Amino acid sequence: MTMLCDWTKIPAVPKYNPVDIMNSIYTTTLTTEARQRGCRVEVCDPQLPIFELVRGKARIRCYNALTDRVGAATFFLAQNKGAANRFLRSRGFPAPDQIVVADPAAAERFVARHRTVVVKPASQWGGRGVSVDVRTPAELKKALAFARRYEDEILIEQKVTGIDYRLIFVDYRFVAAIRRDPARVTGNGRDTIRRLIQTQNRMEVRTDPSHRIPLDRETARALAAQGLGWATVLRAGRSVAVRRTSNYHTGGSVAMATDTVPASLVRLAGRVVRLFGIPVMGVDFLYDPRRRRGWIIELSPDLAISPPEGEGVARRVLDYLFPATGRRAIRSAMVGQRTAPLRRSSPTRRTAARSGV
C-alpha cells in the first residue's frame, strides 16, 4: 500500500528565498571576517548553508560556527535537547526534569507532578514548535500537536523561570554573553495588538527576515494570560510582552551581557563546554537572581553568529580556525621583524662596501 506524506508534520517554508540564507547576517558575519583575513569562501550548499573557508592548504568546512573539527556523534549529543539534558543531569549538572513523550498517560502524570511545563521538539531551533506554561490535559494535547508539526520526537520539560542568558565560548574560552527578552509591543492608543505586531514585523524584516513575531497560538496564549487579545487597543505608551519565549526568531530582543552575566554561570558553562568537547558553542541558561540559581536549558553546538555580539565572536572564531591571521599573531610577527638582531657583516663585505664594489 502506498503511504501518503503527512503534510501537517512539515514546517511551513520560510517567506524568504532560502538561497538568500548564504547571504544572511548569520553567515556573512563570519564570511566577511574570513575574507578580510585573506580566506577564500567556497559555497557547498547555499540553502543549508554549508561553506568552506580556505587559506593556503588549510580548508575548513562550516555550518554557522560548527566546523568539521567536531565529530557527528558529539554534535548530535549536544544538539538533541533530550540527549543533552540526560547527559548533563546524569553528571550532576543543573538541568530541568524532562521526559520524551511516548505514552499519553505518562505525559499527563508529568504535567500533574510539575503543574506547569514546556513542550518542545527535540532538535528544532528558534522557538519553533515550543509551547510554554502548559498546565492542563487539553493544553497538553494542543501543545503536542503543535510540536509535531516540526518533528516526531517531542519533549516535556519542567518549567523554570529566570533571566535568559546565552554564554558563548570559542576555543573553550568565554568570549561573550547575551541576554534575551521576549518580544514586546508598545501601544499608541489607536491600533490593535494585531496591527502593532504587523507594523513591528514589517520594520524588523527589512533587516532580518527571520526576526518576526508569529501571529500564532502561542502569541494568543501569551496575550490571553494577561487578559488581552488580538483586538485589544493598548493605551499610548503601554508596553506588553506578546511571547513567553525569548527567542530572537520569535521577535525577542537581544542585548550584550558579557560584563554583567554572573561569574558562576561562566564557570559552569566552561565545565559544560569541556565536558562535551566542542570548542565553539553556546550554553543557554535561565538564571534566578534572587535564588542565585541557574538552569542549563539548551546547548547550541551549531551557533549562529549575529549582532550584537557577532563581529567580536567572528574575530575570535577566525583566530581559532586560522591562528596565523589573528591580529595578535600579525603584531607579534611585525614586532619580531622590527626587533630582529642585525647581522654583523663580514670583513670582506665591509671592505667591499668601502671600496664601492
Image (tube, rainbow, N blue to C red):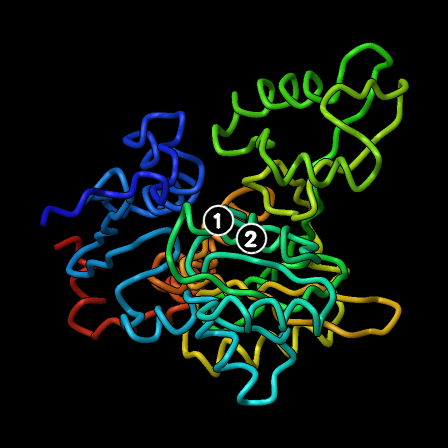
Residue 218 position, x and y percent, is 63, 41
Q: Residues within 10 Å of mark 2 (few under 14, many from 20)?
A: some
Q: Residue at x 31, y 37 (%)?
A: 22
The answer to which quarter of the image holds residue 11 is: top left
Graded by Cα atoms within 10 Å as few (under 14), some (14 to 19) or many (20 or more), the crowding at tag 1 reads some
What residue is drawn where x is 21% and y is 74%? Answer: 346
State if disc 1 and disc 2 touch (CB < 8 Å): yes
Q: Is residue 231 above or below residue 43?
A: above
Name the amino acid, label 1.
Ala
Residue 191: quadrant of the picture:
top right
Disc 2 is placed on an element classified as: helix
Q: Which residue is mark 2?
A: 141
How many numbered marks does the figure carry?
A: 2
Q: The C terminus is located in which quarter?
A: bottom left
What residue type is disc 2 on?
Answer: Lys
Q: Residue 145: which disc? A: 1
Q: Nearer the viewer, residue 110 or 156?
A: 110
Secondary structure at numbered mark 1:
helix
Relative to 59, say whether 217 is above or below: above
